[in-house]
Image (spheres, rainbow, N blue to C red):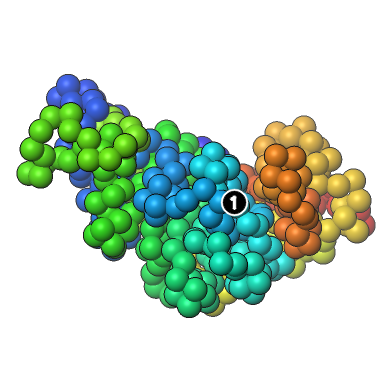
Amino acid sequence: MRPYINGNESRYISEALDTTWISDGDFLRNFQDNFSNQISIKYSFAVSSGTAALHLALLSLDLEEGDEIIIPSFCFLASANLCLQLKLKPVFVDIEIDTWCMSPESILRSITNSTKAIIVVHPYGNLCDMNKIMSIANKYNLKVIEDAAEGFPSKYKNKISGTIGHIGTFSFQATKTITTGEGGMVCTNDSKLADKLELLRSHGFKYGKQREKHYWHELPGLNYRMTNIQAAMGCAQLEKINLIIKNKKKLSSLYTKYLESQKGISLQKITKDVEPVIWAFAIKIDTKYFPQGRDSVMSKLEALGIETRPGFYTPSSLRYFNCNDLENSTKIAASTLVLPSYPQLKENEIEYVCKSLLSLRKK
């Protein structure tokens, strides 16, 4: 991945420095407002990372030690790690073998009297079946946190990822579709949750017209604020979001053109309900055609000047989770290969990546 920095980033960062408002400031408020408008949600709070956004989301739900949180077994495991830190119990569910999204049926089988929330993690820009998941959540009175770090700004039934659950979280880490270096956003349409999230984000302080006393803590909050300098970059990134989306879709279309019908390679299935903006283009390789294995393929591509990434490691492969394998997650994790996915890639570069990959296939 490479960040797409060719707009007003430098200018806005310089303006933020010139004002001397480098922590709080107008860029921060503008970024929050612009992001809310971009995804059509009422409340957005810029934070220091996507993980910080997830932490605040969990804290806002007033969970208790031992409460169970349902999480997919194939995903970046930030939310599961947070559950352990908060003495919550992550309950891992399997994914669908073709979409790589968490399985609603697996969620349904995993609900107990201790279940309090579902964390939906959208993989690689594909989106989970939110209608089914929200229906399950409503039936069992569960809160839904959408981890849209990889899902922004894909749409499910014309709704942008992160706006369908009770709370949405986003990451602006350097590899993400838009970036502030590090950083994130936590969003909701629920005014009560918004009040809690805002307090938790900044030491439990009230701001603006509501603030009556300096240094008065309404609750034991944290400092997860984004800086005005980072937000300046975020404002510039959002200005060209349509161009980034256009280039990302072109990238996906080209990879699909070169790889879709190739033996030994499967692409992530996108359902008709999803309008994807693929964050990272990932494929599944078949060991029948690539008997050397995924990791060996990665090494050989690296020798050709092509940097790739593996699929996510499952929690069962990490000892500290002490959980069992889940069949589909284990299969996908072992065979997934993420190809170069930054929007500046040219067609001849994508063709080179694909031809190099196919050259490693056994005939």
Front residue of 64/25: it is 64
Residue 358, position as x, y percentages in the image: 80, 52
Front residue of 248/134: it is 134
- The quarter in which the N terminus is drawn is top right
Residue 351 in the image: above or below residue 161? above
Q: What residue type is labelled 1?
A: Lys
Residue at the image point whose x is 91% and y is 58% from the top: 288
Residue at the image point whose x is 81% and y is 47% from the top: 294
Left or right position of 2 against 230: right
Left or right position of 23 against 134: left
Q: Mark 1 points at which residue?
A: 89
Residue 340 visible: yes
Residue at the image point whose x is 44% and y is 63% from the top: 143
| Secondary structure beneath label 1 | strand
Residue 293, position as x, y percentages in the image: 86, 47
Residue 259, located in which quarter of the rendered image?
bottom right
Residue 72, position as x, y percentages in the image: 62, 58
Residue 269 visible: no
Question: Crowding near pointer 1: few (<14 within 10 Å), some, many (20+)?
Answer: many
Residue 298 in the image: above or below residue 161? above
